[in-house]
Image (cartoon, rainbow, N blue to C red):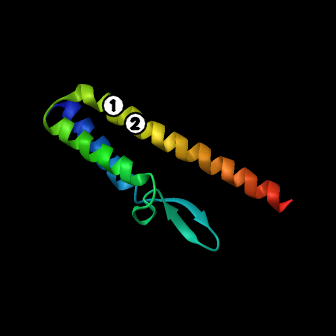
Amino acid sequence: MNTKQLLGLIGSTVLFIGVFMPTVRVPIIGDVNFFQNGEGDGIIVLILAVISLVLVLTKKYEGLWFTGIGSLGIMLFTFINFRSKMSQVKADKV
């Protein structure tokens, strides 16, 4: 197993597991993860993680750019959306 394949396997595994890790801890609701019981954007990230794993196993590393940028874009969109909602909640609270 070469370095590219090892890094690809580690990356796709971390991406897959990361979807289920707690993202935000809300006092009343508890932990919120990216998957949100199958209703969140985590589904798309899971699919991209599986595609990444298949690309690594078939040694087609060029396709990892697509899955990596796609995952990053979805997570960035979710982060910006979350920050916007949090600032809206703070503004409504005052």
At x 29%, y 48%, the residue is 13
Percent of width and height locating residue 16: 33, 51
At x 81%, y 59%, the residue is 92
Q: What type is the residue that disc 1 sits on? A: Phe
Q: According to the image, label 2 marks what residue? A: 70
Q: CA distance from mark 1 to mark 2?
A: 6 Å
Percent of width and height locating residue 87: 73, 51
Q: Nearer the viewer, residue 90 or 9?
A: 90
- Where disc 2 sits, the SS reads helix
Percent of width and height locating residue 52: 26, 40
In the rendered image, the vertical position of residue 29 relative to residue 89, given as above or below = below
Q: Report the residue that reaches farthest toward the bottom.
A: 28
Query: For the residue carrying disc 2, how many other residues have a C-alpha within 10 Å: few (<14), some (14-19), or many (20+)?
Result: some
In the rendered image, the vertical position of residue 75 relative to residue 58, given as above or below = below
- Where disc 1 sits, the SS reads helix
Percent of width and height locating residue 63: 26, 29
Q: Are marks 1 and 2 in contact (CB under 8 Å)?
A: yes
Q: According to the image, label 1 marks what residue? A: 66
At x 68%, y 47%, the residue is 84
Q: What type is the residue that disc 2 sits on? A: Gly
At x 60%, y 47%, the residue is 81
Q: Report the residue that reaches farthest toward the top.
A: 62
Query: For the residue carrying disc 1, how many other residues have a C-alpha within 10 Å: few (<14), some (14-19), or many (20+)?
Result: some
